[in-house]
Image: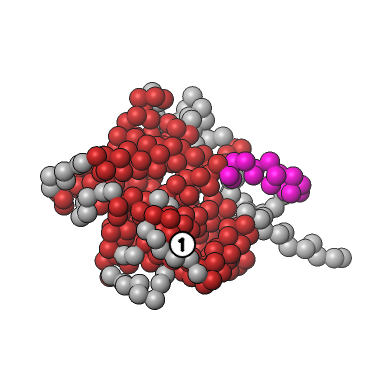
Amino acid sequence: MTATSTTPSVHPLTTRAPSGSSGRGRRTLPRTALTAIAPAVWGTTYVVTTELLPPGHPMFAALLRALPAGLIALAVTRTLPRGSWWGKAAVLGVLNIGLFLPLLFTAAERLPGGVAGTLAAAQPMIVAVLAVAVLRQRLSGRRLLWGLVGVLGVGLVVIGPSAALDVVGVAAGLGSAATMALGITLTKRWGRPEGVSPLALTGWQLTSGGLFLLPLTLLFEGAPPAVDGRAALGYLWLGLIGGLLTYALWFRGITSLPVTNVAVLGLLSPLVAAIFGAMVLDQTLGPVQLVGFALALASIVAGQLPDRRPAPARS
Protein backbone atom coordinates (compact mmCIF):
# COMPACT_ATOMS: atom_id res chain seq x y z
CA MET A 1 0.00 0.00 0.00
CA THR A 2 1.28 3.46 -0.89
CA ALA A 3 -0.35 6.51 0.57
CA THR A 4 0.36 8.69 -2.44
CA SER A 5 -1.66 6.74 -4.97
CA THR A 6 -5.37 7.19 -5.32
CA THR A 7 -8.13 4.97 -6.56
CA PRO A 8 -9.45 6.36 -9.87
CA SER A 9 -13.02 5.39 -9.13
CA VAL A 10 -13.16 7.71 -6.13
CA HIS A 11 -11.47 10.72 -7.69
CA PRO A 12 -13.65 12.07 -10.51
CA LEU A 13 -12.68 15.58 -11.62
CA THR A 14 -15.58 16.33 -13.89
CA THR A 15 -19.18 17.29 -13.42
CA ARG A 16 -20.25 16.45 -16.94
CA ALA A 17 -22.88 13.81 -17.20
CA PRO A 18 -21.69 10.62 -18.87
CA SER A 19 -23.94 8.43 -20.91
CA GLY A 20 -26.34 6.45 -18.77
CA SER A 21 -26.08 9.05 -16.03
CA SER A 22 -29.67 8.51 -14.91
CA GLY A 23 -28.93 4.89 -13.99
CA ARG A 24 -25.72 5.93 -12.31
CA GLY A 25 -27.64 8.59 -10.39
CA ARG A 26 -29.96 5.93 -9.01
CA ARG A 27 -26.96 3.87 -7.93
CA THR A 28 -25.38 6.83 -6.13
CA LEU A 29 -28.58 7.78 -4.32
CA PRO A 30 -27.85 5.62 -1.22
CA ARG A 31 -24.35 7.13 -0.96
CA THR A 32 -25.77 10.62 -1.33
CA ALA A 33 -28.31 9.89 1.41
CA LEU A 34 -25.56 8.67 3.76
CA THR A 35 -23.45 11.73 3.02
CA ALA A 36 -26.44 13.97 3.75
CA ILE A 37 -26.56 12.62 7.31
CA ALA A 38 -23.43 14.64 8.12
CA PRO A 39 -24.74 18.18 7.48
CA ALA A 40 -28.10 17.19 8.95
CA VAL A 41 -26.41 16.22 12.22
CA TRP A 42 -24.23 19.35 12.10
CA GLY A 43 -27.47 21.33 12.12
CA THR A 44 -27.79 20.41 15.80
CA THR A 45 -24.56 22.31 16.58
CA TYR A 46 -26.35 25.62 17.11
CA VAL A 47 -28.84 24.37 19.69
CA VAL A 48 -26.24 22.21 21.45
CA THR A 49 -23.80 25.13 21.63
CA THR A 50 -26.32 27.60 23.01
CA GLU A 51 -28.25 25.24 25.31
CA LEU A 52 -25.65 22.79 26.66
CA LEU A 53 -22.12 24.15 26.36
CA PRO A 54 -20.51 26.76 28.62
CA PRO A 55 -20.38 30.11 26.78
CA GLY A 56 -17.24 31.88 25.75
CA HIS A 57 -15.13 28.83 24.86
CA PRO A 58 -15.57 28.15 21.12
CA MET A 59 -12.02 26.88 20.64
CA PHE A 60 -12.32 24.46 23.56
CA ALA A 61 -15.55 23.13 22.06
CA ALA A 62 -13.82 22.69 18.71
CA LEU A 63 -10.87 20.94 20.38
CA LEU A 64 -13.09 18.43 22.20
CA ARG A 65 -15.03 17.82 19.00
CA ALA A 66 -11.87 16.98 17.06
CA LEU A 67 -8.94 15.57 19.02
CA PRO A 68 -10.55 12.78 21.13
CA ALA A 69 -12.54 11.54 18.12
CA GLY A 70 -9.41 11.61 15.95
CA LEU A 71 -7.40 9.61 18.47
CA ILE A 72 -10.21 7.05 18.71
CA ALA A 73 -10.22 6.67 14.91
CA LEU A 74 -6.43 6.20 14.87
CA ALA A 75 -6.67 3.58 17.62
CA VAL A 76 -9.38 1.67 15.76
CA THR A 77 -7.83 1.76 12.28
CA ARG A 78 -4.13 1.68 13.33
CA THR A 79 -3.28 3.39 10.05
CA LEU A 80 -0.93 6.35 9.76
CA PRO A 81 -0.23 8.55 6.73
CA ARG A 82 2.73 7.78 4.50
CA GLY A 83 4.90 9.94 2.30
CA SER A 84 3.27 13.11 1.06
CA TRP A 85 0.10 12.29 2.95
CA TRP A 86 1.62 13.57 6.18
CA GLY A 87 1.54 17.05 4.69
CA LYS A 88 -1.78 16.59 2.91
CA ALA A 89 -3.47 15.28 6.06
CA ALA A 90 -2.13 18.26 8.01
CA VAL A 91 -3.45 20.76 5.44
CA LEU A 92 -6.86 19.09 5.24
CA GLY A 93 -7.06 18.79 9.01
CA VAL A 94 -6.38 22.50 9.48
CA LEU A 95 -8.91 23.55 6.81
CA ASN A 96 -11.71 21.07 7.54
CA ILE A 97 -11.25 20.97 11.32
CA GLY A 98 -8.66 23.28 12.86
CA LEU A 99 -9.89 26.51 11.29
CA PHE A 100 -13.45 25.57 10.38
CA LEU A 101 -14.67 24.44 13.79
CA PRO A 102 -13.56 27.43 15.93
CA LEU A 103 -14.91 29.81 13.28
CA LEU A 104 -18.18 27.86 13.27
CA PHE A 105 -18.53 27.96 17.06
CA THR A 106 -17.58 31.64 17.14
CA ALA A 107 -20.30 32.44 14.60
CA ALA A 108 -22.79 30.29 16.52
CA GLU A 109 -22.04 32.18 19.76
CA ARG A 110 -21.96 35.74 18.36
CA LEU A 111 -24.80 35.55 15.82
CA PRO A 112 -28.36 34.29 15.81
CA GLY A 113 -28.41 30.76 14.43
CA GLY A 114 -30.24 32.00 11.35
CA VAL A 115 -27.61 34.54 10.39
CA ALA A 116 -24.79 32.05 10.95
CA GLY A 117 -26.64 29.45 8.91
CA THR A 118 -27.21 31.83 6.01
CA LEU A 119 -23.51 32.73 5.87
CA ALA A 120 -22.64 29.03 5.87
CA ALA A 121 -25.04 28.51 2.97
CA ALA A 122 -22.61 30.39 0.71
CA GLN A 123 -20.32 27.36 0.76
CA PRO A 124 -21.73 25.63 -2.38
CA MET A 125 -21.10 28.74 -4.48
CA ILE A 126 -17.54 29.00 -3.17
CA VAL A 127 -16.97 25.34 -4.03
CA ALA A 128 -18.37 25.88 -7.54
CA VAL A 129 -15.79 28.63 -8.10
CA LEU A 130 -12.91 26.72 -6.49
CA ALA A 131 -13.71 23.68 -8.65
CA VAL A 132 -12.74 25.74 -11.68
CA ALA A 133 -9.34 26.75 -10.29
CA VAL A 134 -8.42 23.60 -8.35
CA LEU A 135 -10.19 20.78 -10.20
CA ARG A 136 -10.13 22.33 -13.69
CA GLN A 137 -13.89 21.98 -14.03
CA ARG A 138 -15.87 24.37 -16.18
CA LEU A 139 -17.84 27.02 -14.33
CA SER A 140 -21.46 26.00 -14.08
CA GLY A 141 -23.86 28.93 -14.25
CA ARG A 142 -26.69 26.59 -13.35
CA ARG A 143 -24.99 25.57 -10.11
CA LEU A 144 -24.22 29.17 -9.19
CA LEU A 145 -27.85 30.10 -9.83
CA TRP A 146 -29.17 27.28 -7.69
CA GLY A 147 -26.59 28.20 -5.07
CA LEU A 148 -28.09 31.69 -4.89
CA VAL A 149 -31.54 30.14 -4.65
CA GLY A 150 -30.30 28.03 -1.76
CA VAL A 151 -28.88 31.04 0.09
CA LEU A 152 -32.16 32.90 -0.46
CA GLY A 153 -34.15 29.93 0.79
CA VAL A 154 -32.04 29.53 3.91
CA GLY A 155 -32.25 33.27 4.55
CA LEU A 156 -36.05 33.18 4.39
CA VAL A 157 -36.12 30.23 6.78
CA VAL A 158 -33.80 31.45 9.48
CA ILE A 159 -33.37 35.22 9.43
CA GLY A 160 -36.02 37.09 11.34
CA PRO A 161 -36.69 40.84 11.38
CA SER A 162 -34.82 41.22 14.68
CA ALA A 163 -31.67 39.44 13.51
CA ALA A 164 -28.61 41.30 14.74
CA LEU A 165 -25.27 41.48 12.97
CA ASP A 166 -21.94 41.29 14.75
CA VAL A 167 -18.82 42.10 12.72
CA VAL A 168 -16.68 39.40 14.30
CA GLY A 169 -19.49 36.88 14.00
CA VAL A 170 -20.09 37.68 10.34
CA ALA A 171 -16.37 37.38 9.58
CA ALA A 172 -16.25 34.05 11.41
CA GLY A 173 -19.30 32.75 9.53
CA LEU A 174 -17.89 33.67 6.12
CA GLY A 175 -14.49 32.35 7.13
CA SER A 176 -15.93 28.98 8.16
CA ALA A 177 -17.71 28.68 4.80
CA ALA A 178 -14.53 29.55 2.88
CA THR A 179 -12.21 27.22 4.80
CA MET A 180 -14.59 24.27 4.55
CA ALA A 181 -15.12 24.97 0.82
CA LEU A 182 -11.36 24.89 0.20
CA GLY A 183 -11.02 21.80 2.36
CA ILE A 184 -13.75 20.01 0.41
CA THR A 185 -12.16 20.92 -2.91
CA LEU A 186 -8.67 19.78 -1.90
CA THR A 187 -10.08 16.58 -0.40
CA LYS A 188 -11.63 15.89 -3.79
CA ARG A 189 -8.43 16.71 -5.67
CA TRP A 190 -6.20 14.50 -3.53
CA GLY A 191 -8.74 11.69 -3.18
CA ARG A 192 -8.08 8.94 -0.67
CA PRO A 193 -4.94 6.75 -0.57
CA GLU A 194 -5.49 3.28 -1.94
CA GLY A 195 -6.34 0.82 0.80
CA VAL A 196 -7.05 3.54 3.38
CA SER A 197 -10.56 3.54 4.85
CA PRO A 198 -12.73 6.64 5.20
CA LEU A 199 -12.47 6.24 8.99
CA ALA A 200 -8.66 6.35 8.83
CA LEU A 201 -8.73 9.46 6.61
CA THR A 202 -11.16 11.03 9.07
CA GLY A 203 -8.87 10.15 11.97
CA TRP A 204 -5.88 11.81 10.29
CA GLN A 205 -7.79 15.04 9.77
CA LEU A 206 -9.48 15.15 13.18
CA THR A 207 -6.18 14.47 14.91
CA SER A 208 -4.15 17.00 12.93
CA GLY A 209 -6.90 19.58 13.31
CA GLY A 210 -7.10 18.89 17.04
CA LEU A 211 -3.33 19.17 17.49
CA PHE A 212 -3.47 22.48 15.62
CA LEU A 213 -6.16 23.68 18.01
CA LEU A 214 -4.53 22.51 21.24
CA PRO A 215 -1.90 25.28 21.71
CA LEU A 216 -4.22 27.94 20.29
CA THR A 217 -6.93 26.98 22.77
CA LEU A 218 -4.53 27.24 25.70
CA LEU A 219 -3.18 30.54 24.38
CA PHE A 220 -6.47 32.32 23.70
CA GLU A 221 -8.85 30.73 26.21
CA GLY A 222 -6.56 29.59 29.00
CA ALA A 223 -7.87 27.02 31.45
CA PRO A 224 -10.85 24.95 30.26
CA PRO A 225 -14.30 25.76 31.64
CA ALA A 226 -16.06 23.74 34.28
CA VAL A 227 -17.90 20.85 32.63
CA ASP A 228 -21.16 19.74 34.24
CA GLY A 229 -23.42 16.91 33.13
CA ARG A 230 -25.20 18.95 30.47
CA ALA A 231 -21.93 20.15 28.99
CA ALA A 232 -20.47 16.64 29.03
CA LEU A 233 -23.50 15.38 27.11
CA GLY A 234 -23.09 18.17 24.58
CA TYR A 235 -19.38 17.50 24.08
CA LEU A 236 -19.99 13.76 23.68
CA TRP A 237 -22.65 14.41 21.05
CA LEU A 238 -20.46 16.85 19.12
CA GLY A 239 -17.37 14.64 19.34
CA LEU A 240 -18.67 11.13 18.69
CA ILE A 241 -21.74 11.76 16.54
CA GLY A 242 -21.12 15.25 15.18
CA GLY A 243 -17.42 14.55 14.74
CA LEU A 244 -16.24 10.97 14.27
CA LEU A 245 -19.33 9.44 12.64
CA THR A 246 -20.42 12.33 10.47
CA TYR A 247 -16.97 13.30 9.21
CA ALA A 248 -16.35 9.69 8.14
CA LEU A 249 -19.58 9.80 6.11
CA TRP A 250 -18.73 13.27 4.77
CA PHE A 251 -15.22 12.44 3.56
CA ARG A 252 -16.44 9.18 2.07
CA GLY A 253 -19.02 11.14 0.10
CA ILE A 254 -16.51 13.76 -1.07
CA THR A 255 -14.16 11.14 -2.51
CA SER A 256 -16.90 9.18 -4.28
CA LEU A 257 -19.41 11.83 -5.46
CA PRO A 258 -19.07 15.02 -7.56
CA VAL A 259 -17.75 17.72 -5.27
CA THR A 260 -20.43 20.28 -6.12
CA ASN A 261 -23.14 17.70 -5.40
CA VAL A 262 -21.70 17.14 -1.94
CA ALA A 263 -21.24 20.84 -1.19
CA VAL A 264 -24.88 21.71 -1.76
CA LEU A 265 -25.88 19.11 0.82
CA GLY A 266 -24.48 21.56 3.38
CA LEU A 267 -27.72 23.53 3.05
CA LEU A 268 -29.32 20.83 5.18
CA SER A 269 -27.43 22.11 8.22
CA PRO A 270 -29.24 25.46 8.66
CA LEU A 271 -32.56 23.83 7.75
CA VAL A 272 -32.15 21.24 10.50
CA ALA A 273 -31.03 24.03 12.84
CA ALA A 274 -34.30 25.86 12.12
CA ILE A 275 -36.33 22.70 12.76
CA PHE A 276 -34.62 22.15 16.11
CA GLY A 277 -35.11 25.82 16.94
CA ALA A 278 -38.83 25.34 16.45
CA MET A 279 -38.89 22.10 18.43
CA VAL A 280 -36.57 22.99 21.31
CA LEU A 281 -36.58 26.79 21.50
CA ASP A 282 -40.25 27.36 20.60
CA GLN A 283 -39.33 29.35 17.51
CA THR A 284 -42.09 29.65 14.94
CA LEU A 285 -42.05 28.72 11.26
CA GLY A 286 -44.54 30.81 9.29
CA PRO A 287 -45.45 30.92 5.59
CA VAL A 288 -42.28 32.81 4.65
CA GLN A 289 -40.13 30.17 6.34
CA LEU A 290 -42.01 27.39 4.55
CA VAL A 291 -41.36 29.08 1.20
CA GLY A 292 -37.69 29.28 2.17
CA PHE A 293 -37.67 25.57 2.99
CA ALA A 294 -39.10 24.79 -0.44
CA LEU A 295 -36.46 26.92 -2.19
CA ALA A 296 -33.59 25.43 -0.20
CA LEU A 297 -34.79 21.87 -0.78
CA ALA A 298 -35.21 22.60 -4.50
CA SER A 299 -31.61 23.84 -4.56
CA ILE A 300 -30.40 20.64 -2.87
CA VAL A 301 -32.27 18.43 -5.34
CA ALA A 302 -31.11 20.48 -8.34
CA GLY A 303 -27.55 20.25 -7.05
CA GLN A 304 -27.67 16.46 -7.40
CA LEU A 305 -28.55 16.61 -11.10
CA PRO A 306 -25.66 16.30 -13.57
CA ASP A 307 -24.74 19.20 -15.79
CA ARG A 308 -26.01 18.71 -19.32
CA ARG A 309 -23.50 18.29 -22.08
CA PRO A 310 -23.63 20.94 -24.77
CA ALA A 311 -25.56 19.78 -27.79
CA PRO A 312 -23.20 18.52 -30.53
CA ALA A 313 -22.84 20.78 -33.55
CA ARG A 314 -24.64 19.59 -36.61
CA SER A 315 -22.69 19.25 -39.81
Name the colour scheme: secondary structure
* Left or right: residue 105 compared with residue 315: left
Residue 232 locus on image (x, y percent): 26, 39
Residue toward you, 81 or 180: 180
Residue 215 falls left or right of residue 11:
left
**Whole-percent x, y for residue 296 in the image:** 55, 63
Label 1 SS: loop
Placement of 87 over or under 288, stated as above or below: above
| Location of residue 209 (image quadrant) | top left
Residue that appears at 23% across and 46% down: 60
Q: Residue at x 20, y 55 (%)?
A: 56
| Magenta stretch, residue numbers | 19-33
The amino acid sitting under disc 1 is Ala
Residue found at the far front of this picture:
282
Residue 142: % across, % down: 62, 66
Along the line of sight, which residue is nearer the eye, 305 or 55?
A: 55
Q: Residue at x 33, y 50 (%)?
A: 48
In this view, the residue farthest toward the right is 315
Q: Residue at image x 53%, y 53%?
A: 265
Quadrant showing the C terminus = bottom right
Residue placed most toward the observer, 53 or 17: 53
Tell me which secondary structure the magenta stretch mostly adopts. Answer: helix
On screen, 256 above or below 136? above
**Is residue 31 part of the magenta span, yes or no?**
yes
Q: Which residue is mark 1?
A: 121
- In the rendered image, is residue 73 in sight? yes
Q: Could you tell whether 235 is left or right of 247 in the image?
A: left
